[in-house]
Amino acid sequence: MSSILDEYEDSLNSRHPVHHSSRLSAANIGMTHSGFVNVRLEEEKPIFNKQRIDFSPPEKINHFAVCNNQLCMSLGKDTLLRIDLAKPDRPNQVELGRKEDSRVHKLFLDPTGSHLVISLSTSECLYLNRNTQKVRSLSRWRGHLIESVGWNKLLRTETNTGPILVGTSQGIIFEAEISASEGSLFNTNPDQYFKQVHSLEEDGRPAPVCCIEVERGPESKVVIIATTRKRLFQFVGRVAEGSEQQGFSAIFSQNQELLPSFQEFPFNMGYSEITFYTSKLRSCPKAFAWMMGNGVLYGQLDYIRPDSLLSDVQVWDYTPDIDFSFNKPISIVLTQFHFLLLLPDRVKAICTLNGQVVYEDVFPDKFGTLKKMIKDPAGGLVWIYTEKAVFRYHIQREARDVWQMYMSMNKFDLAKEYCRDRPECMDMVLAKEAEHCFQDKRYLESAKCYALTQNYFEEIALKFIEAKQEEALKEFLLKKLNNLKQSEKTQITLLVTWLTELYLNYLGLLQSDEGKHGVFQETRDEFRKFFSSSKHKECLYNNRTTIYDLLASHGNVDDMVYFSVIMQDYERVISHHCQHDDYSAALEVLSKHCDEKLFYKFSPILMQHIPKKVVDAWIQMGSRLEPKKLIPALVNYSQMGSTQQVNETIRYMEFCVYQLTVTEEAIHNYLLSLYAKYKPDSLLWYLEQAGSHLSDIHYDLKYALRLCAEHGYLQACVLVYKIMELYEEAVDLALQVDVDLAKTCADLPEDDEELRKKLWLKIACHVVQEEKDVKKAMNCLSSCNLLKIEDILPFFPDFVTIDHFKEAICSSLEEYNQHIDELKQEMEEATESAKRIREDIQEMRNKYGVVENQEKCAACDFPLLNRPFYLFLCGHMFHYDCLFQEVTPHLSTYKQTKLGELQKRLAAATQTSKSRHRPAPKEKEEGGDTASLGKGSAGVSREQIKSDIDDIIACECVYCGELMIKSIDKPFIDPQKFEEEKSSWL
């Protein structure tokens, strides 16, 4: 018994099951009409795979129940065997301890496998919990033969069933509750209560409640389904949230006023059984199958319908070989697409879609008569037992052949749903759907389906051509094109070319029919959308010459232009517009797509006809255009064109110079030439704003000078000379225009006084000799401080009297006298300053300070006179070594190094000294004067070393001088020693 769940195939002792299926033969190898190769290397496992459990019961198996991998069976007279299928090697055997005349009538196991109710033939009931060994009697249930139990799937626990429904052989429905706990001292019964809630009848007499099921629907809806031998009852009600513990009395009371909803069938085979299919564990059932006298009632469960829970019901009659006289159906189990009928010697599987028997398994006589068939909802296994053996069925890939049944029923959407992962089956379904639509003359739908199949392309295309369905053919080609991969370039090219020809033919027919203008416009939009598809763009681009030829052969100019735009072949579009003298349209295409090369190519011809619009487009393009590449067109039409073209040329050049700040010399030179020839008033303004430094100039100065000289613009020439720093030429030319202009030129060489003087002498000479104006010559003296009266006297003629420049001579003499007086005053101030300095030096030599004997060092606070010290004018006093320690951290690296070297030299000089004396107190004044460190017989070098050390550490008071100011932003603790200091405080 320890190996009860060891599974094996009883292939030697069982017959091969008979399969009734319309599936393709597993050995079928070959090419189908769809182009798929159906090759199966090994035989597929059957949907219903039977396995016999290696278990030989010590006694006859009377009854059997299994739920949630918990198996219970009644053996012999008084034995109950329990097995946890997760631990099959540890079975549990319980003795019922019942009377001799009683036998087990039925076993009822709840969906969790925790609660077992044992109905006895003596109208008694026992209860056994999974976690106990003690069988307890349900005293309140005594006197009723229990036929069915409706378990509570919402409120159950391992120790309590919650409110449940119990059906009896007398048609009474009781509500009860069982608890596995021991209860109180006075109430040790496991049954908490047992009360009648309803009764069922047939033909006016009580009828046994064969099955009862309790389900919880959406929106707090509770559904109770109960069956008798001929009737199926429905009870539907709502239970408020939080009141579930009150039981099901309210559900039945809500249906008291109305007759209960039921379905009745005439034939009675003495019992019935109902089974349900649930797609997911702990969800509501979706379908049901009721085995009764007239056949199997199958349907769906719709929890939303207000009138009846059952929907899409149909009755599948029993097969002719089922005779109630000797082989009545015993049990039924429902799966997703089949229901299994248990007969005394075999199992039949009937498809719920078409009622056909798809599987039949005959059991050997040696196992005895089949007793019962049970499905475990947790694992989906189907269990069958006889008195001597136990079998179970694995249901594998039940939906594998469903697609064929749906396809034969012309339910193509459902068929495709169940063969999504099987492309060869999907292809067959699509081909059948396409053929079905074609026969119904739904050609467009047929074309869409054919495009998804692998059927021969030529056959389908010819099929639509023979039927003269060009629209369907076009739809087929479009769908086929969309399904092709990018690597299938040949097929894509073929389809694209064919579709273009079809569209053009259809557009030609529609265009000739004035009554179909709307259809023509829709087709044209569709055709252009086809051209615009990004998926076909590469193919269209590679074959654009062929497409152009097709469009040209049909004379379809508008679509050819549109196609050119799609292909970004704007040159062809613009050429087309220019050939038809539609220059504005050509410029619009140019402006819209902003192709610089096309601007350079077509600007000459467009400038000839619409110069203003062209320049506006150039300006809109801004810096994306290179103005230098537009100059040939501008030069051509500015020389031979009208005034408008010249003005537009100047406008664009000004835009380039003033707004785009173009620095190319050719642009500036061309603008200069335009100004010189057509707008001389703007020439001088341009030269002035262009700047006066060579680094700011972007035109050719020599070219500008020659251009201005050729046109006689002397003032402009003077400006160019000034920029070129040819000041003499500028002054010479400016004197021909205006003396004031020459004066501004003469002041430009600010750093060269000799040149300035020379230029001003030229101006004075011109004024005296050419203009013969003595007064204006005197004004030159006041305008330039470099000229003296004696410099211009040689220019005057001999007949000029002194009266004309007497004032200038007097003014010159006065300046000389004033300069002499300023020199005398400066000498006196220097003499006085030197005298004061000598007095200060003498006073400092006699300066002294008094140190009391109780004075202390400002650094260490020890008596000052114990060691050599320093005294500063500020009053601070330091020992020599204390001051050394205070100053050294604030010194630069260079000074610290130098100080170390001086100390070494001082130590060396001290060791070589023959006589040593204690150093006398030393005074140090702020500012650097200090007394000697001590008297003795030390040499001059030792004193010099001490003096150098004093200059470093005692140049100022460490507390009052610059060192203290610089140390304000330094931290009190050295960052490198911060962690060490921090740890010392902890």
Image: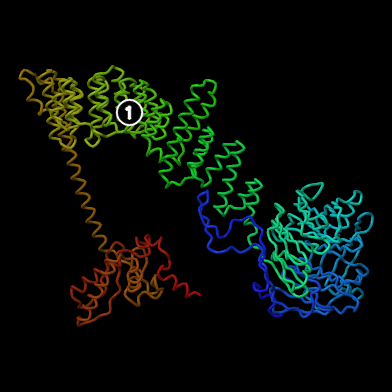
Pick the front one: 16 or 847: 16
Q: Residue 352, percent across and down?
A: 71, 54
Q: Is residue 378 above or below residue 415?
A: below
Q: Residue type at mark 1?
A: Phe
Q: Residue 322, percent across and down?
A: 78, 60
Pick the front one: 440 or 114: 440
Identity of the residue furthest to the left in this view: 798
| 578 sits to left or right of 20 | left
In the figure, residue 767 lies in which quadrant? Answer: top left
Identity of the residue furthest to the bottom in this view: 914
Pick the front one: 591 or 486: 486
Q: Residue 405, percent across and down?
A: 65, 51
Q: Residue 308, percent across and down?
A: 81, 48
Q: Which residue is mark 1?
A: 655
Q: Is residue 9 above or below residue 873?
A: below
In the figure, residue 76 lies in which quadrant? Answer: bottom right
In the figure, residue 565 lies in which quadrant? Answer: top left
Q: Say what secondary structure mark 1 lies in.
A: helix
